[in-house]
Image: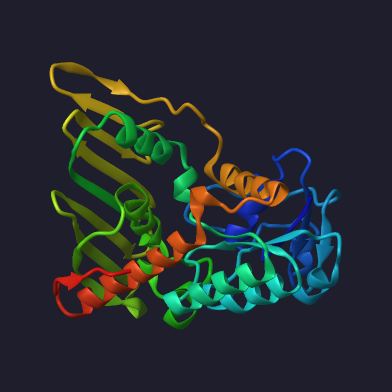
């Protein structure tokens, strides 16, 4: 199978590094930047140290334009690492050309765009998956396993993700292209809440947006029948370090993680704290892409990360932003 990675910015370079470790996968890269097509990624930066400044591209096919890729019968699938505003048009074009599609998160700028992409995939009989990578991160996989098997009833849950406003991709600060900082960043935790707990009954959110001054923050509450999920974070001023974390309290313990730690911890009554070592420590990006590749190879829909779920995450993110704009108004959730 041959996978073409489209775009070699921070996320494209991250996906390329991860895909390079997958056995028996042929890789192509697509970029308009001649330096990048020679393996020079020194201009690429991001909020996590997951890229390399120089890569050996001798085993990769290289393309300078997307239409070239779509016309090539040897390319089976594309991995779209492009500004969010381009996701729908590039996805639809690829599906109509007979390619399977992995598209970066957020899947689209609104639910209607996501629905059109899903409809096109069904019509073309091709695999479509949005890269909600948190579902494949070892710490979050361990959390889901704990909730499914050991936690008991959930009492409360908190997810937080913060970083400086990005300086590596000017398009990210353009709300028309990215949806804004909260939308682009917290889509991870919003999707995770849906993945773990399903759809809430209602939501409320407060915060502040001032993109010219690098601020876009949100504090949200997702109300379920017997518990509340808190999601907070966003973009802060220049130099603010990236971090992600969660704390979930169940009848049988408290499961806690911060990105500065190697593994999550489990706290239980009258029991020493336990470090939770994931059963699978595969890098989340590699696990995500490998899962997509296997779905294509086996002609199976991506049930672990279904595009319908990614569309719902987009809808919920926009509902939270609507509540924020209405100073925390409690809004019914019907995704």
Horizontal side of 299 relative to 317 (left or right) equals: right
Q: Give residue 283's position: percent from left, percent from top.
A: 55, 39
Horizontal side of 69 relative to 335 (left or right) equals: right
Residue 165 can be seen in this image: no
Q: Residue at x 19, y 28 (%)?
A: 252
Which of the pair 219/113 is nearer the observer?
Answer: 113
Residue 57 can be seen in this image: yes
Q: Which residue is drawn at 18% across and 73% down?
A: 331
Which of the pair 291/171 is nearer the observer?
Answer: 291
Q: Residue at x 49, y 44 (%)?
A: 136
Q: Give residue 270's position: percent from left, percent from top.
A: 13, 17
Tell me the quarter of the image containing the C terminus: bottom left
Which picture quadrant has residue 190? bottom left
Q: Residue at x 28, y 50 (%)?
A: 159
Q: Give residue 89's position: percent from left, percent from top.
A: 62, 79
Residue 274 to residue 29: above or below: above
In this figure, which colouring scheme has been used for the structure?
A: rainbow
Q: Which residue lies furthest to the top in this view?
A: 271
Q: Give residue 80's position: percent from left, percent from top.
A: 63, 65
Which of the pair 61/320 is nearer the observer?
Answer: 320
Residue 15 to residue 258: above or below: below
Q: Which residue lies furthest to the bottom in this view?
A: 176
Horizontal side of 205 relative to 43 (left or right) equals: left
Horizontal side of 263 relative to 1 (left or right) equals: left
Task: Report the label total.
Answer: 0
């Amino acid at each position: 199978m041959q996978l073409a990675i489209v775009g070699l910015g921070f996320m494209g370079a991250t996906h390329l590094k991860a895909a390079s470790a997958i056995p028996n996968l042929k890789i192509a890269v697509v970029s308009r930047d001649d330096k990048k097509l020679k393996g020079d990624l020194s201009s690429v930066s991001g909020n996590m140290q997951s890229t390399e400044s120089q890569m050996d591209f001798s085993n990769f096919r290289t393309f300078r334009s997307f239409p070239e890729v779509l016309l090539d019968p040897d390319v089976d699938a594309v991995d779209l690492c492009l500004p969010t505003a381009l996701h729908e048009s590039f996805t639809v074009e690829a599906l109509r050309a007979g390619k399977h599609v992995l598209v970066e998160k957020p899947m689209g700028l609104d639910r209607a765009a996501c629905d059109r992409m899903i409809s096109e995939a069904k019509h073309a009989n091709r695999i479509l998956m949005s890269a909600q990578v948190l579902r494949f991160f070892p710490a979050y996989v361990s959390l889901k396993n704990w909730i499914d098997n050991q936690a008991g009833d959930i009492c409360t849950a908190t997810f937080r993700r913060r970083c400086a406003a990005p300086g590596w991709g000017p398009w990210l600060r353009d709300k028309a292209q990215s949806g804004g900082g909260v939308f682009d960043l917290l889509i991870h935790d919003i999707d995770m809440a849906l993945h773990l707990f399903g759809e809430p009954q209602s939501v409320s959110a407060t915060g502040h947006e001032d993109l010219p001054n690098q601020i876009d923050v949100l504090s949200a509450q997702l109300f379920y029948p017997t518990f509340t999920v808190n999601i907070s974070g966003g973009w802060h001023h220049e130099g603010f370090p990236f971090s992600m974390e969660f704390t979930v309290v169940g009848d049988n313990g408290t499961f806690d993680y911060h990105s500065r730690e190697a593994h999550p911890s489990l706290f239980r009554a009258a029991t020493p704290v336990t470090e939770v070592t994931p059963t699978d420590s595969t890098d989340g990006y590699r696990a995500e892409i490998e899962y997509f590749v296997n779905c294509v190879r086996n002609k199976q829909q991506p049930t672990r990360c279904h595009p319908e779920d990614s569309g719902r995450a987009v809808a919920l993110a926009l509902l939270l932003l609507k509540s924020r704009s209405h100073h925390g108004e409690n809004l019914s959730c019907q995704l």
